[in-house]
Amino acid sequence: MEKDSRAKGMSNNGNGFAVVDVETTGFGSGDRVIEIGIVLLDHRLRIVDEYETLIDPERDLGPTHVHGITPKMISMAPSFGEVASAIAKRIGDRVIVAHNLIFDERMLGQEFGRLRAIFDPGVGICTLKLTKQKLPAACQMLGVDPPSHHRALADARASAGLLRALKPKCNGQPLKLGNVPGEISVRTHRRCADEGTLVLDRLISRVVYTEGDTRLLQYMDLLDWVLDDFVLTADERQHLNFLAEELSLSEAEIVRAHEQYFDAMVVGAKKDGIITQEENAALAFVANALGIPIDRVPAVTEPDCGCSSIPVGSSICFTGSFADSNGNKLPKAELEKLATNRGFTVVSNVTKSKCDVVVAVDPSSSSGKAKKAREFGKPVIASQDFLKQVQN
């Protein structure tokens, strides 16, 4: 009886429900999705699958102090185009559920629209409208485990919990997607379990063979988890060996898996056009852990500006959304005023002859200005280093 009453009032809709949450660079038509979490429920509201990945927006990340996603985290992440088919496979032909549905639908619609895909959101379910509360308050009100705020999968799980608690008497219509380009990729890139390990936030990703060998998928998934804290213990090696034996992986298959995993990390590290000191060190660690020859680790190519300070009189270009050390928003105009008062020249664009330094929230920024600076061999300085210099 419990199973039947639990789904009372809910539309079956064949494939059930896709509870989604996205983190984005902002709210406008030019903003991009940078993280997505999806929880799939069947028509009885039982969880049948979960999916999460960071997404490289190929532009500035916006308010990093709000969503907590840094350029270093996403420099190894796939673009939306690379995971569009995997996302479409999960949310297509399901009723979409979200907390503030209109926002998530709009941002996903814009992303699929850029790929010239057909995106018909159908009629979804908004848990914000149903509860009339922000997500943490709604969870508290209904006895649902609270989310880690601004974490896409955690928020999607919380919204799924609200749906299960509410069992709303409304009939949704499934989302429809068509003409989504690209093959289905199983590659994802998640936030590191230890967010203090910044370099592996961007260098650890799930990598599997394109032919979809489920044994290798399981092995790679465990490999992804054991490496993400920059330590490979004896117990973790033993777990990997046990799993390989259980999956009947040959030595040749394990070697091939390790090589493809490492090569994918190298490709991701090179995505922004440079290999930093910490990327080089991280790749060397992974190569050593996986038995990859050390000569396959790419050399450091990041330009060395010699110091983190900016010579007085330099021409500075600012890029990104800034915050002070307490996380409070810092208007770009205020930074520009500080720079001018300290004898710097502020320029609006990065050029080879009229810009000396770019100041960004993070030197690994993927903004157009930061990319141009690297192309021209100009240093990209962290905003906190700039603030230390001008406020002393």
Image: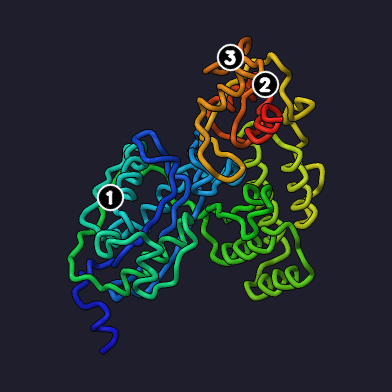
Do the CB atoms of the residues marked 1 and 2 lie less than 8 Å apart? no
Q: Is residue 161 left or right of residue 323?
A: left
Q: Residues within 10 Å of mark 3 (few under 14, many from 20)?
A: some
Classify the position of the N terminus by image quarter. bottom left
Residue that badge 3 annotates: 351
Query: Residue 216's quadrant in the figure?
Result: bottom right
Q: x, y percentage for residue 316?
A: 62, 19
Q: Is residue 124 left or right of residue 76?
A: left
Mark 2 element type: loop
Residue that badge 1 annotates: 102
Q: Is residue 94 visible?
A: no
Give the residue at x 21% y 54%.
122
Camera-side residue of 349 and 173: 349
Residue that badge 2 annotates: 378
Camera-side residue of 144 and 274: 144
Query: Residue 93's quadrant in the figure?
Result: bottom left
Camera-side residue of 13 and 102: 102
Give the residue at x 38% y 75%.
143
Furthest-bottom residue in view? 1
Q: Is residue 100 left or right of residue 392?
A: left
Q: x, y percentage for residue 235?
A: 76, 72
Measure how far apart labels 1 and 2 are at the Cα level.
41 Å
Q: Is residue 106 left or right of residue 311?
A: left
